[in-house]
Image (cartoon, rainbow, N blue to C red):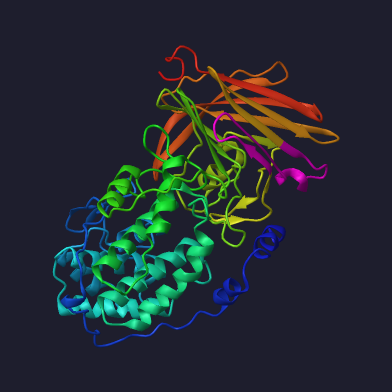
């Protein structure tokens, strides 16, 4: 444990360590500042609304779990479920009143900076859509913004910092509070340059979080047109991010499962593209590059290949040990899939879903390619090397995640999309004996054929695919195992057959 902790902390920025130890004390602003006058406003385009999770008074369905709540901070309920409850993603006057009455200043999980940020934005968007906020709600909203301004998540950075900045910008525009506005804008000036890569990918390399942040950027473009002259035009950032999202979707229109990714959290890509079109924001035409992902495609198949870093060194919280994994769709349907994610709790299921065995890649000597641990920690991590691709028929890369072993190992993978099949060549470079395992996870509706060479002992194992939080579907994983002296090379073929072999 000491080694894991040391090899995790050494990647942090000084400000993260400082803010973990010394957290500023939030303050309260009363009365509410003035609301920005109508004369300053332009048109507000309808944004993306979530389905109302409230089934009845006090009863909600979130993350595929239905609960009646008597306590907004029930310790028996998972933190993630409570976070989603406190977002108030579909607000109404009665729910806002209840939240204010039962969540006094600074008390409970709803005052954590991330749910606080999302709730501020959701209330303001609800008001911009033509609904009313009474004086009590306005005073609460301004108190929440002031509290957030002293609780920005510099200890985490990453996507949480962007969510904080968005809330401050929304609050600073909605109220006449230039200090909040300038605080949020200053964060965006530095963080957009770092967090949005030149190819449009978000630097945490999670398609799910990328989609959430893209929605945020589109909301900011929208806000800038509603409050004329207060914000920069971030349409170029949104355009790059739209292009990246399009590249990272399967033919079914949904995201690939790399790092923390699942359906039902971010808006569906089609909904995001529709929102961008209503704002007249167009996708850029650039290809995948700096983010490290590769898309290969022909008339029958699409391959998404992970030759990416697991994320920023100082914030790999949503990373999985999935380096050099891939996903495959054939004839418009998913065939080979990464396993997804269903929980953020610190438990065996979370550990398994982040592990190398949950992805379509190679494990050596029973070790993960990156040392994922706890719910959001990574110690020593794999780094991709020697990435090559023509962005159409082949991709090649290596990683150094196994060079930490007593006898260092280099894993090299060459993946080629040829007529009628996907061919994967794995080279294991080392100087002694090692145990090698190759994993290929079928989609629950897939009967994809996986053909190994004669060296590998073949097994088909019953496993699970996790398409949404708190939801699983049975699938099968084809595993090839070998133990012996290295170096060694394995060739795996996934033929596409006559068009019916890859799906039941």
What stretch of residues is rendered in magenta? 386-411
Q: Is 31 situated above or below 394?
A: below
Residue 304 lies in magenta, yes or no?
no
Residue 400 is a magenta residue: yes
Q: Is residue 502 above or below residue 23?
A: above
> Residue 345, percent across and down?
47, 53
Which of the 4 quarters of the picture holds residue 360?
top right
| Residue 71 in view, yes or no | no
Q: How many numbered circles are shown?
A: 0
Residue 225 sits in which quadrant?
bottom left
Please say whether residue 88 is visible from this viewpoint. Answer: yes
Q: Position of residue 87 (x, y in %)?
A: 31, 62
248 horizontally vs 77: left or right: right
Furthest residue in direction top, as rendered: 498
Q: Is residue 282 above or below residue 233?
A: above
Q: Position of residue 26 (x, y in %)?
A: 41, 82
């Amino acid at each position: 444990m000491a080694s894991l902790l040391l090899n995790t902390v050494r990647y942090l920025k000084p400000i993260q360590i400082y803010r973990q130890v010394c957290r500023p004390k939030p303050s309260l602003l009363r009365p509410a500042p003035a609301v920005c006058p109508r004369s300053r406003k332009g048109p507000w385009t309808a944004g993306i609304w979530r389905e109302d999770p409230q089934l009845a008074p006090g009863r909600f369905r979130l993350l595929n779990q239905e609960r009646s709540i008597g306590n907004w901070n029930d310790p028996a309920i998972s933190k993630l479920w409570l976070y989603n409850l406190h977002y108030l993603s579909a607000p109404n006057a009665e729910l806002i009143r209840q939240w204010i009455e039962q969540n006094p200043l600074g008390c409970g999980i709803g005052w954590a900076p991330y749910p606080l940020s999302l709730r501020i934005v959701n209330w303001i968007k609800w008001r911009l859509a033509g609904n009313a906020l009474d004086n009590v709600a306005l005073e609460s909203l301004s108190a929440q913004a002031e509290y957030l301004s002293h609780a920005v998540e510099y200890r985490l950075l990453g996507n949480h910092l962007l969510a904080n900045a968005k809330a401050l910008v929304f609050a600073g525009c909605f109220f006449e509070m230039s200090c909040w506005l300038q605080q949020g804008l200053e964060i965006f000036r530095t963080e957009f340059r770092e967090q949005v890569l030149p190819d449009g990918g978000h630097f945490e390399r999670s398609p799910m979080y990328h989609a959430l942040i893209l929605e945020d950027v589109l909301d900011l473009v929208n806000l800038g047109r509603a409050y004329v002259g207060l914000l920069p035009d971030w349409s170029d950032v949104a355009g790059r991010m739209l292009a990246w999202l399009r590249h990272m979707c399967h033919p079914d229109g949904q995201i690939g499962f790399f790092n923390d990714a699942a359906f039902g959290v971010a808006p569906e890509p089609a909904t995001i593209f529709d929102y961008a079109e209503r704002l007249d924001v167009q996708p850029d035409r650039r290809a995948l590059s700096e983010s490290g992902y590769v898309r290969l495609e022909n008339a029958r198949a699409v391959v998404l290949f992970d030759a990416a870093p697991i994320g920023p060194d100082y914030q790999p919280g949503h990373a999985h040990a999935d380096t050099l994994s891939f996903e495959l769709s054939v004839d418009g349907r998913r065939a080979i899939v990464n396993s997804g994610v269903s929980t953020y709790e610190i438990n065996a299921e979370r550990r398994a879903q982040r592990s190398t065995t949950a992805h379509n890649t190679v494990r050596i000597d029973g070790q993960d390619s990156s040392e994922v641990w706890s719910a959001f920690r990574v110690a020593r991590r794999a780094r991709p090397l020697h990435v090559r691709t023509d962005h159409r028929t082949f991709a090649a890369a290596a990683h150094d995640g196994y060079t930490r072993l007593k006898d260092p190992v280099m894993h090299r993978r060459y993946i080629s999309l040829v007529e009628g099949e996907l061919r994967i060549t794995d080279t294991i470079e080392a100087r002694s004996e090692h145990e090698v395992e190759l994993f290929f996870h079928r989609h629950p509706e897939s009967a994809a054929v996986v053909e190994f060479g004669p060296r590998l002992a073949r097994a088909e194992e019953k496993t699970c695919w996790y398409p949404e939080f708190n939801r699983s579907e049975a699938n099968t994983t084809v595993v090839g195992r070998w133990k012996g002296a290295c170096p060694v090379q394995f060739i795996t073929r996934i033929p596409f057959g006559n068009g019916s072999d890859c799906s039941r």
